[in-house]
Amino acid sequence: MEKLTTIRLFFEENRSLFSGGILNYFLKNLSTLCLRGGGKKKKKKNYTKPKKNKHIRKKTKLKVLSYYSVDKGKVKKLKKESPESPGCFLAEHTDRLTCGKTGLTFMKNY
């Protein structure tokens, strides 16, 4: 509180040095002004575990060509199509088939 009163007195004594707008702004906001003394620097964090590597998507050119095969002039679809949205193939997981567009899931029976 002592610092705030000394600053207020300094501004009021030297009113002629400061323009009115700046002085009024400081005097109004003096109560909300937070003056920190000689605080210490924040210590740098020392991490114990190494950074996780982000998953990088494997890109393959013309991936759609692997969904079809051609035998004797006939085109055959290798992946199953979603019944709800034709043209959208089902993703093959170890235990299920899922549609990425509609979320439709078929469980595999072993």
Image: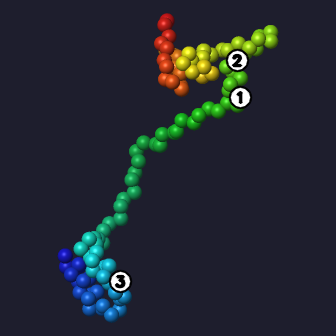
| Residue nearest the observer in this picture, 75 or 62 | 75
Residue 42 in view in this figure: yes
Q: Which residue is mark 2?
A: 68
Q: Amino acid at mark 1?
A: Leu
Residue 92 in view in this figure: no
Q: What is the number of the mark on residue 93?
A: none
Q: Which residue is mark 1?
A: 62
| Residue nearest the observer in this picture, 20 or 36 | 20
71 horizontally vs 63: left or right: right
Q: Amino acid at mark 3?
A: Gly
Q: What secondary structure is marked by label 1?
A: loop
Q: Residue at x 37, y 88 (%)?
A: 19
Q: How many residues crowd mark 3 within 10 Å: few (<14), some (14–19), many (20+)?
A: few
- Compared to residue 102, the image places residue 45 above or below, namely below
- Compared to residue 13, the image places residue 105 above or below, namely above
Marks 1/2: CA distance? 12 Å
Q: What secondary structure is marked by label 3?
A: helix
Q: Quadrant of residue 28?
A: bottom left
Give the x, y percent position of residue 11.
28, 86
42 horizontally vs 67: left or right: left
| Residue nearest the observer in this picture, 103 or 9 | 103
Q: Which residue is mark 3?
A: 21
Q: Earlier in the sequence, mark 2 or mark 3?
A: 3
